[in-house]
Amino acid sequence: MSTDDAEGVRLQKVLAHAGLGSRRACETMIAQGRVSVDGAVVRELGTRVDPATAVLHVDGLRVQLDDSQVTIALNKPLGVVSSMSDENGRPDLSQFVADRAERLFHVGRLDAETTGLLLLTNDGELAHRLAHPSYEVSKTYVATVEGRVAPKLGRKLTAGIELEDGPVTVEDFAIKDISGQTSLVELTLHEGRNHIVRRLLAEVGHPVTQLVRTQVGPVRLGSLRAGRTRTIAGRELGALMQAVGL
């Protein structure tokens, strides 16, 4: 970081290029003390930085300065395996990013019968942290299950259930709808073990018939249609990076 006009790029220009607003708006953010460079709050409008090495935060959220790093959200359709190339010839993720120049990797996985939000990125550090249990990134699912779910089930799940490979605790649980002998429930947990939601709900007597992941950390599936992707950028990307300590 430097205030020397001879080196680096003006901070407000870097922020504007990263999509944080016009240069004037970025100057206002700097003057308000909302911007930090390498951990230190900066208010000097003459500050210049090296975009290749500087770590910038705005309102506590990391700003992605490397244009070559891309993170996208995919609404994975039913029957698609979480692989970029399936050796058995099953439909895989490659078809949804075939037009992209970047070599993207999926973060975690959803089984073929589960639909919904899957993240893909070429940011190795972000992918590593999102997948690592120590960062405990929450994941939210909506499940259609067999049977009429009793209100007391929520307390049981948040207290913890013992499975064959260890205990699992649900952070939040809500019954969204009950119709006949079928219930619609929403649950949030930090687990990443294989088939964890299906195994958990089967263990408490409510086998899953349909499952969709609707959120990973701060990233929501929203209205993204099956088979479509969207780029995660700006504040949404900053919040995702914040969730894993970047």
Image (tube, helix red, strand yellow):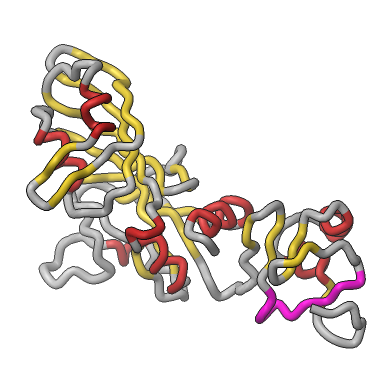
Query: Where is residue 75 drawn, in percent x and y?
Result: 36, 48
Write down the quadrant of residue 99 in the picture.
bottom left
Residue 70 visible (yes or no): yes
Q: Residue at 12% across / 30% down in the picture?
A: 204
Side of 116 relative to 31 (left or right): left
Q: Is residue 239 above or below residue 92?
A: above
Write down the quadrant of residue 54 in the picture.
bottom right
Side of 224 relative to 187 (left or right): right
Magenta span: predominant SS is loop
Q: Is residue 229 above or below residue 154?
A: below
Q: For the C terminus, which image quadrant?
A: bottom right
Q: Is residue 180 above or below residue 189?
A: above
**Of 206 and 81, the residue lying toward us:** 206
Query: Where is residue 17 drawn, in percent x and y?
Result: 74, 66
Q: Residue at 19% across / 16% down in the picture?
A: 150
Q: For the N terminus, which image quadrant?
A: bottom right
Residue 100 visible (yes or no): no
Query: Where is residue 146 drawn, in percent x and y?
Result: 12, 25
Farthest residue in the bottom direction?
6
| Magenta stretch bounds | 46-54
Q: Residue at 45% across / 72% down in the picture?
A: 125
Side of 19 relative to 47 (left or right): left
Write down the quadrant of residue 206 in the picture.
top left
Farthest residue in the front direction?
159
Q: Is residue 164 above or below residue 109?
A: above
User: Does the stretch in magenta take in 242?
Assistant: no
Query: Where is residue 76 drawn, in percent x and y?
Result: 31, 50
**Of 241 and 228, the residue lying toward us:** 241
Q: Residue at 28% across / 48% down in the picture?
A: 77
